[in-house]
């Protein structure tokens, strides 16, 4: 099979064989692809983490505008980010493909390349999957399994009044990249470097797995979540689960150099832009070095609700709204 | 939300809340729906089983012709059948929904009813999921996690010359039901009971979980698989994995009373019809009572290949072909 071939040129088992031949086995895999189920060896004493997320053509990406490896990368990153938010170590993944017969085989190869390359960075092995024929667009669902020490596990509940609120990395950069993809006219006047930085952050985000492990193992975070729904919305989830409120300081919000150099609506993107795989966590103490930028952006309070403090000291309500993956009519890329 | 409402009337979180409110927690669920990942408590000493399968509108079912609970039932049954084929105990499930906004909410409720009802029968808890917007049809992917004792695990490899080949229940009945759904003219002359039996077997098959557990715990099966690809194709998988051949006796093939009463091509349906969730296994000894019909249908041989012995003693080659879920243009129902 060479370039130009399409998925429909192969039968189910030929396609599975082709995909499986690209995959390597890994630690804890007793039986991998090729039997009725995968058989995995859990680590004694650890609890199991399980999460699933998908990429849908026409909703999360446009086939014409997105490199296939970026679709695979983002798909795995979104699942790894959920494991990171629990303080866990990701281990295994299962892929469910729904593919139209006219999909180029090269696209599927690219998808797997994106997943396998990112998986190798984080020790994640693809151990199983399913292939189905799609009468319409492409849907790829991924399930990731991980492990965590029971006494280290992070959840959304546990933030206490007086805790500081921290966020890793650069919230808003991924959403900024998405705006530049969907509206190329916004690139006018921006340097090629800025454009590439923001789009790259959208296409190939780095899930904060190591940072989540440090937070979990050092026991410093009282609550943790990833901000895939947007910083304000996901802080809202922590507040709801913890029964608390919070005030954020606008001056403290981190803005990536590329986002800062853009003409985009930075505050909206940082607070409400979705699909960022940074960690938002609360802690009564200064966190240890996570190896990535980490900024204190506010404080947990007993008073319910979410508020924003302006540089002049004025405090205003902040809507805990973000990116609705379901209702949104905007097409990702 | 009442009858007449559609999926697009709700946002992502409202829809998730609606679905989660129908679900109960279960054994081994430390953190269920509502955090970044599910947290599960594995049983010490057991290995983990993981499998994924999907139902795609227009490929596996037609929305107009299939009760939504049957889609949910079949989806979970297909995954449970894979766990059964490994001799495992199914425990937890994650659902990935890709839904068009105009899908009636009642359809999603029905889907969950089918999954939850069957799950309760087998002690399976839905612990997580994802919801995405579909620009086209409905896709539902399900991942099921189970457990098995390392020394009881069944696989496809292990069949030895001299072993007998057994199959549970009624292969071909599900495929017969599908033919009656796709070609209603074939129902002419059949009793209402026969039609209902066959269609019901297609819509709401019983995965052979208990039988798989008995085979595993009693250590009598040398190889095992479910026949979702068709009896001949799946026996072919056992033979390939075990490095052996087999001869089946046509006279020994089990034919359900309803299939027998139909005018359908019984031999083709029993040998090559897909989507049956019976177990095919090999054993050097007579298996214990499995609580369901179980028939010896042939013998494993050293000579590679698959053969069929006719009542007159004539032996002919049997193609290890079955139902190709991917290439097939036939629409399920």
Image: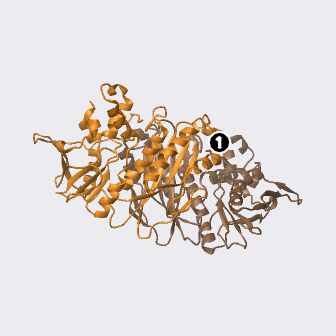
Chain colours: A orange, B brown
Report x, y in % for residue A280: 28, 51
Kindly identify which chain the residue marked by label 1 belongs to.
Answer: A
- Residue A137 visible from this viewpoint: yes
Report x, y in % for residue B102: 45, 37
Is residue A320 shown left or right of residue B227? left
Judging depth in this view, the residue of B220 and B263 nearest the camera is B220
Against A30, is B137 above or below? above
Is residue B25 shown left or right of residue A99? left
Report x, y in % for residue A42: 47, 66
Which residue is labeled 1 in the image? A10
Against B123, is A267 above or below? above
Is residue B62 shown left or right of residue A93? right
Is residue A257 shown left or right of residue B273? left
Judging depth in this view, the residue of B191 and B205 nearest the camera is B205
Report x, y in % for residue A331: 41, 34
Task: Give the mark count.
Answer: 1
- Crowding at dot 1, Cα within 10 Å, few <14 / some 14-19 / many 20+, comes out as some
Q: Quarter-wise, where is residue A170 in the image?
A: top left
Which residue is located at x 52 percent, y 41 percent? Answer: A110
Secondary element under disc 1, as helix, strand or loop, is loop
């Amino acid at each position: 099979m060479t370039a130009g071939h399409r998925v429909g040129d192969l039968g189910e088992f030929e396609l599975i064989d082709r995909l499986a031949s690209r995959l390597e086995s890994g630690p804890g895999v007793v039986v991998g692809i090729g039997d009725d189920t995968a058989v995995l060896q859990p680590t004694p004493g650890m609890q199991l983490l399980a999460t699933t997320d998908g990429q849908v053509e026409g909703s999360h990406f446009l086939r014409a505008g997105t490199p296939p490896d970026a679709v695979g990368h983002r798909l795995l990153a979104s699942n790894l980010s959920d494991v990171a938010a629990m303080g866990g170590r990701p281990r295994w993944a299962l892929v469910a493909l729904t593919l139209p017969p006219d999909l180029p085989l090269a696209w599927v190869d690219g998808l797997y390349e994106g997943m396998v390359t990112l998986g190798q960075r984080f020790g994640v092995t693809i151990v199983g999957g399913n292939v189905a024929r799609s009468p319409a667009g492409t849907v790829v669902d991924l399930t990731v399994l991980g492990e965590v020490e029971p006494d280290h596990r992070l959840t959304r509940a546990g933030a206490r009044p007086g805790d500081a609120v921290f966020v890793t990395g650069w919230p808003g950069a991924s959403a900024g990249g998405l705006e530049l993809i969907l509206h190329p006219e916004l690139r006018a006047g921006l340097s090629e470097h800025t454009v590439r930085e923001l789009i790259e952050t959208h296409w190939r985000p780095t899930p904060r797995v190591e940072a989540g492990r440090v937070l979990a193992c050092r026991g410093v975070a009282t609550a943790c979540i990833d901000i895939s729904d947007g910083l304000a919305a996901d802080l809202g989830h922590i507040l709801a689960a913890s029964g608390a409120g919070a005030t954020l300081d606008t001056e403290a919000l981190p803005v990536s150099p590329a986002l800062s150099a853009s003409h985009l609506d930075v505050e909206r993107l940082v607070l409400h832009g979705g699909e960022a795989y940074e960690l938002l966590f609360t802690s009564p103490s200064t966190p240890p070095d996570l190896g990535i930028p980490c900024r204190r952006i506010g404080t947990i309070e007993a008073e319910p609700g979410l508020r924003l403090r302006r540089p002049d000291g004025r405090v205003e309500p902040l809507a805990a709204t973000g990116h609705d993956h379901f209702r949104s009519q905007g097409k990702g890329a």
